[in-house]
Amino acid sequence: MTLLSLIITHYQNRLGTECGHKVDKKRTITREEFTGFLRDALNNLYDPVHLRQNPLAGLFGVADRFDAASAIRNILIDAVNALKPGDDESAQSRAWRIYDALSFCYVQQLNQEMAADQLGISARQLRRELRAAFEVLSDQLYEQLGLSARFDGSVAVPQPRETTSALTEELAWLRNTSPEEPTDLRQALPALLEMVRPLAEPRGVGLEMHLADDLARLAAHAVVVDQILLSLLSAALSQVCCKRVSVSVESLRWGVEIEVRSVRSCADAQVLPDESISNLDTAYQLVDLCGGRLRVDEDDASFVTVLTIPAVGQVPVLMIDDNADTLQMLQRYTTNTRYHLTGVRDPAQVFDVAEKLAPQIIVLDVMMPQEDGWKVLARLRQHPTTLDIPVVVCTVLAQETLALSLGASSFIRKPLTRQTFLAALDRQVALMETESR
């Protein structure tokens, strides 16, 4: 069995092999469709909502799991890493070109200009290398999944679960509006523990709460945070031999971590009830919509869920734009989100403000009367204060290729919607978090 086979088998065994999609027996997946699903997943590798609805979830056997998105992501990253050549392989070999192209463009999410620069080749050559590398990865996954042997090259294709789509549509407003008030866990958590006490007391289960002193408020709607925590507490209380449930909360760099731990009094085999599995599935989807993360761990002694939610204003963003109305609009867009936006209308002030603010992201307009934005971008890429800060170019001009070639990390066109603007910032945060692991 190859390493790639072991990777897929590991995830299917650990996460379950039942496909949570309805299957139309008359609908089959061709090799070309599988390639399309794979390409879509790789292009959206850090978009959990998108990944959950990709048919690869069913083919990998993880669609019915509450952590389907992270499972797909881990399978694909491990599949790319499985292609990494040994140290004795020549750095100029085809094997290294295949691995580097996939790693830079998909796992590390470098744009093609940056990836080409890392490899010392032209962007056109990179595209050729990437097409070849993608075919190698697709071939191996297709073979390891056994799809080539089924139905003469076809296999029943899973359709998206109705419950997932319905919940996504029902809560679409989360992506389009800011919470009127940030969530204060010091107020919310005691009320939630009182709410679940009637579930705990008849079983003799104790409830504990530990809150750090320096807790920031959460950049998420209180009703959504309440539902996520109720789902996690219900799952913790459903454990056999549960004697104590503790909730611990502490601040992180850009968010707040909430650990819900069910401590067991015996080592009996634990099987989550269907209701708890459904609750965790819903919790994962809600966490995805809030831009957070959820992890589930368990052993003989405990069942643990670890939730991370972005905190209000903990990611400083510097916006360079001469238009006061635009700056005011973007201030509204980032109200009560994880981002604290500071606007600068005069490019001459940029470096003084950057030194005081220490922004994690810079957003730059191009069409400014005081100074050409392209020249400002060049200065940002050379100045020691801003050299390593990702720059998102934001303009009405259709100049993405030029922006990326001059060192921008991303590009978005005006006019902006709230969802487009926050998604561009979220992508930069996701990349920073990936690089820091």
Image (tube, grey):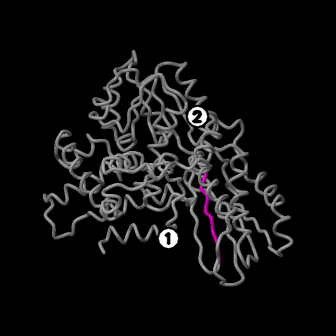
> Dot 1: within a 10 Å radius of its alpha carbon, few (fewer than 14), some, or many (20 or more) residues?
few
Q: Answer with left or right where residue 180 lies relative to residue 338.
A: right
User: Would residue 148 be counted in the magenta stretch?
Assistant: no
- x, y percent for residue 219: 63, 44
User: Would residue 305 be counted in the magenta stretch?
Assistant: yes
- x, y percent for residue 358: 48, 42
- What whole-number distance in Å separates the C-alpha atoms at marks 2 and 1? 39 Å
Q: Looking at the image, which residue sits at the far top? A: 369
SS of the residue at dot 1? helix
Residue depicted at x 59% and y 50%: 285
* Up-down relation of residue 228 to residue 369 (above or below): below
Q: Which residue is mark 2?
A: 334
* Up-down relation of residue 165 to residue 158 (above or below): above
The boundaries of the magenta stretch are: 302-309
Q: Amino acid at mark 2?
A: Thr
Residue depicted at x 64% and y 76%: 270
Q: Looking at the image, which residue sits at the far front? A: 26
Mark nearer the N terminus (2 vs 1): 1
